[in-house]
Image (spheres, rainbow, N blue to C red):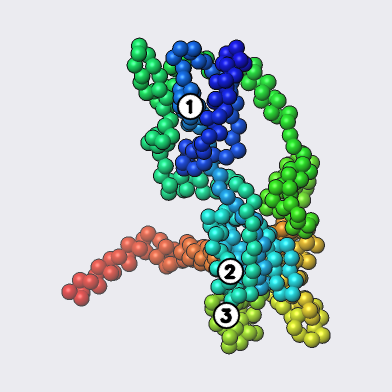
Amino acid sequence: SEDTLSVNYQRLILQHISEKAHKGVLTGSDITDIKITIVSGRAHKKHTSGGDFREATYRAIRQGLMEAYSVLLEPYYSFRLELPENMVGRALTDINLMKGSGEIIDKTNEKVIIEGVAPVRLMRNYHKEVIAYTKGLGRLSQAFIGYFPSNDSEQIVKEIGYNPLTDFANPSHSIFCKNGTSFSVPWYEVKNYMHLESYLKELNLDDKDKEVKRQEEQFISQEEIERIIQKTFFANKTDKSKWKKHTIRVSTKEDKVKTYEDNFAKDECLLIDGYNIIYAWPELKELSDVNMDAARLQLLDILSNYRGVKKCRIIVVFDAYKVPGHQEEISKYKNIYVVYTKEAQTADDYIEKFAFSNRKKYNITVATSDALEQLIVRGQGSKLLSARELKQEIERVNEMLRRTYIDVESSNRNSIIKNISSHVKTKLNELIKDKKRFRK
């Protein structure tokens, strides 16, 4: 109020607040979106001058920043990436390495469109890489959308190495006067020397309980959260470009009950993209170059042995979409099922349809290294195994069987010496000794 501090000094403080860019204490970068409120102040009619409030304003802001919990923000791009279908895996891997997020929103004419967001510092020159690995067929458009919390704040702060205590242009300590002399006070001791009572006080227990209860009663509906996200990230976009990765899920009691019922007493089912696995495993790929039928049989034999240990339903799906007039064929090979798709149907199509139709009946795991297929089946709630992970799992099971067999053989091995009586053992030892003496 004007009774505490005259309006002229209040205006002077506001002027000094806006006359310079204030630096943050994490990296020395400009601070943004900060609200500053004048809550109290004091001036002396004789000894206070305008320059005093300039220094006091700068140091008070710095004091607040040192005490507050700072969050490092960095600029983000929203992007739209168009590229050939066979390059999707490379693009999604790059987006993940850039700490970004992306979603496939369209797939037409052997082209895929990915939209998402990523930090500017990591995506600044990515258009050059897109042109290089797509051989000019890819196109990337970017637009600045604002500042958001950094995913690598600790690493960035460490790399910049900014120390707010040694930044003499933006000092964090304060100057006080006593007995006609001035002295410097570190920021963490300032409150002990202040001429004013601190405006920020700790809440008592009753006030804390009321505050906690008030915060618990406040909530935002799921619809409101999605509306805010859509306005922030995807204004001027159609419904099919909704940002699923940034959707915040608010769980309820009904959701928990439903999840329990969906997962109760389900059988395990492993769906395998046959040709994808063959071309991903070096030994099978090498065999397929000579004889594809032999590669298929070897894969089926490996999976059949695996099925003998893992009590789950295994379905291996092979493409036959280029075979004219071919009808869908389902057969049983030993203890696993083999599917050859019909004409104009890919293995991916069959797996997607089966996973969606049987998601309530089975706990489904899909084994494929097709990045696009992985995104689709993951969206349907299925688990994923890459070709490498499937190979490692089978090798682990085989090693476990081998060790078990060796242990059983060692424990069950029968020898004559174990089954003879002690009297006979004594006689045998005597004969052995006599034989040795005779040789000598």
Drawn side of residue 292 relative to residue 332, left or right: left
Q: Quadrant of residue 287?
A: bottom right
Measured in 3D between alpha carbons, the distance from the residue under mark 2 to the one under mark 3, in whole angstroms, is 29 Å
- CB under 8 Å between discs 2 and 3: no
Q: Nearer the viewer, mark 2 or mark 3?
A: 2
Which residue occupies 77% across, 41% down?
A: 224
Which residue occupies 76% across, 56% down?
A: 237
Q: Nearer the viewer, mark 1 or mark 3?
A: 1
Q: Which residue is mark 3?
A: 285
Q: Which residue is mark 2?
A: 130
Drawn side of residue 181 relative to residue 298, left or right: left
Residue 129 vs residue 428, the one in the foreground:
129
Amino acid, disc 2: Val
Mark 3, residues whose alpha carbon is within 10 Å: few (<14), some, or many (≥20)?
Answer: some
Residue 186 vs residue 212, the one in the foreground:
186
- Quarter of the picture containing the N terminus is top right
Q: Earlier in the sequence, mark 2 or mark 3?
A: 2
Residue 321 locus on image (x, y percent): 76, 80
Which residue occupies 63% across, 65% down?
A: 140
Q: Which mark is residue 149?
A: none
Amino acid, disc 3: Lys
Amino acid, disc 1: Arg
Residue 138 vs residue 326, the one in the foreground:
138
Q: Earlier in the sequence, mark 1 or mark 2?
A: 1
Q: Which residue is mark 1?
A: 54
* Residue reaching furthest to the left: 440
Q: Earlier in the sequence, mark 1 or mark 3?
A: 1
Mark 2, residues whose alpha carbon is within 10 Å: few (<14), some, or many (≥20)?
Answer: many
